[in-house]
Image: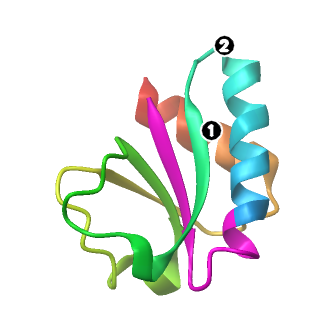
Amino acid sequence: MRIYCVCGAGIGTSVIMARLAERALAELEIQGTVQAVALGDIDSSSPAQLILATEDIVSSLHTGRSQVVVIKTVTDFTEIREALAQALG
């Protein structure tokens, strides 16, 4: 499983989400690769199965077949863990 955490530049918000997502996957005992990515690096041929993104950039994502999960508070570990648990089911 490949998960992208997306923000405008790929070096701030996405890195925070990626670290918390890695921790959440470990707690949920789900194997996967998490990567922080800039919005401009996402295209319709994205190999990620899941994309975590903030509300302000979701409408700019052209994700193809990737499932998109909106994260409201990027520093909220519980929100990210619950979002991953629900999305990965």
Q: In the displayed image of the protein, which residue is found farthest to the top?
A: 29
- How far across and down, in percent of the image, does residue 85 sit? 55, 30
Asked whether residue 5 is drawn in magenta, I would say: yes
- How far across and down, in percent of the image, does residue 71 sit? 58, 63
**In the rendered view of the protein, which quadrant contains the C terminus?**
top left
Residue at 37% x, 46% y: name it. 48
Task: Check disc 1: other Cα within 10 Å, few if <14, some if 14-19, many if 20+.
Answer: few
Residue 18 horizontal side relative to residue 47, left or right: right
Asked whether residue 61 is drawn in magenta, I would say: no
Q: Earlier in the sequence, mark 2 or mark 1?
A: 2
> In the picture, residue 82 is in which quadrant?
top right
Magenta extent? 1-14
Residue 22 horizontal side relative to residue 30, left or right: right
The numbered dot on residue 52 is none
Q: Is residue 38 above or below residue 85?
A: below
Q: Would you say the residues marked 2 and 1 are in contact, meaning their CB atoms lie under 8 Å apart?
A: no
Residue at 34% x, 41% y: name it. 49
The residue labelled by disc 1 is 82
Front label number (2 vs 1): 2
Residue at 74% x, 63% y: name it. 15
The residue labelled by disc 2 is 29
Q: How is the image coloured?
A: rainbow
Q: Amino acid at mark 1?
A: Glu
Residue at 63% x, 74% y: name it. 10
- How far across and down, in percent of the image, does residue 36 sit? 62, 60
Q: Is residue 4 above or below residue 43?
A: above
- How far across and down, in percent of the image, does residue 24 sit? 72, 33
Q: Amino acid at mark 2?
A: Glu
Q: Is residue 20 above or below residue 38?
A: above
> In the picture, residue 63 is in which quadrant?
bottom left
Spatial CA span between label 2 and label 1: 13 Å
Q: Secondary structure at mark 1?
A: helix
